[in-house]
Image (tube, rainbow, N blue to C red):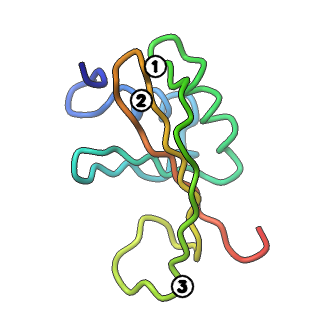
Amino acid sequence: MGSPMVGNERLEAVKVREKFGDALLKVKEYRGDTFLCVKRESIVDVLTFLKNDPELEYTYFSECLGVDYSTWTHERDLPNRFEVVYNLMSLKYNSRIFVKVGVDDGE
């Protein structure tokens, strides 16, 4: 079973947009995965919401990683030098979602 959909969009993206508004900067679908790009200041609230919302239940924190785009010349999701990527799993739906924030040196 995959994540529930609302029209052509995943429920997670719809609910985060409804609750956090412009804190959701971008939703990206790539190779079957969904990426939610959010403002750095909202990351704790968004992750907490995804975990505690009874319709979503992203209760399994799989990993957190950092990406340095200082020499990357291709299109990026966020303009910052670094991205911090959180990989979350919903055991309820056996699905995962990636939540990304952009940061620069010293942040």
At label 3, counting other C-alpha atoms closer than 10 Å, the crowd grade (few under 14, some 14-19, many 20 or more) is few
- Could you give the CA–CA distance between mark 3 and mark 2, rounded to whole angstroms? 30 Å
Q: Hey, which residue is sitting farthest right in the picture?
A: 106
- Choose between 21 and 85: the one closer to the eye: 85
- Could you give the CA–CA distance between mark 1 and mark 2, rounded to whole angstroms? 7 Å
* Quadrant that contains the N terminus: top left
Relative vertical location of residue 22 with respect to residue 50 in this rendering, above or below: below
Q: Secondary structure at mark 1?
A: loop
Q: Hey, which residue is sitting farthest front in the picture?
A: 62
Q: Residue 17 placed where, x, y %?
A: 48, 35
Give the residue pinned by disc 1: 56
Q: Residue 63 placed where, x, y %?
A: 55, 45
User: Nearer the observer, disc 3 or disc 2?
Assistant: 3
At label 1, counting other C-alpha atoms closer than 10 Å, the crowd grade (few under 14, some 14-19, many 20 or more) is many
Q: Residue 22 placed where, x, y %?
A: 55, 45
Find residue 70 and report its image quarter. bottom right
Give the amino acid type for the residue marked by disc 2 in the picture.
Glu
Q: Secondary structure at mark 3?
A: loop
The circle drawn on residue 70 is 3
Give the amino acid type for the residue marked by disc 1 in the picture.
Leu
At label 2, counting other C-alpha atoms closer than 10 Å, the crowd grade (few under 14, some 14-19, many 20 or more) is many
Give the amino acid type for the residue marked by disc 3 in the picture.
Ser
Q: Residue 76 placed where, x, y %?
A: 40, 71
Which numbered disc flags the more N-terminal residue, 1 or 3?
Answer: 1
Q: Residue at x 58, y 24 (%)?
A: 51
User: Horizontal placement of 2 versus 45: left or right?
Assistant: left
Is the Cβ of the residue at disc 3 closer than 8 Å to that at disc 2? no
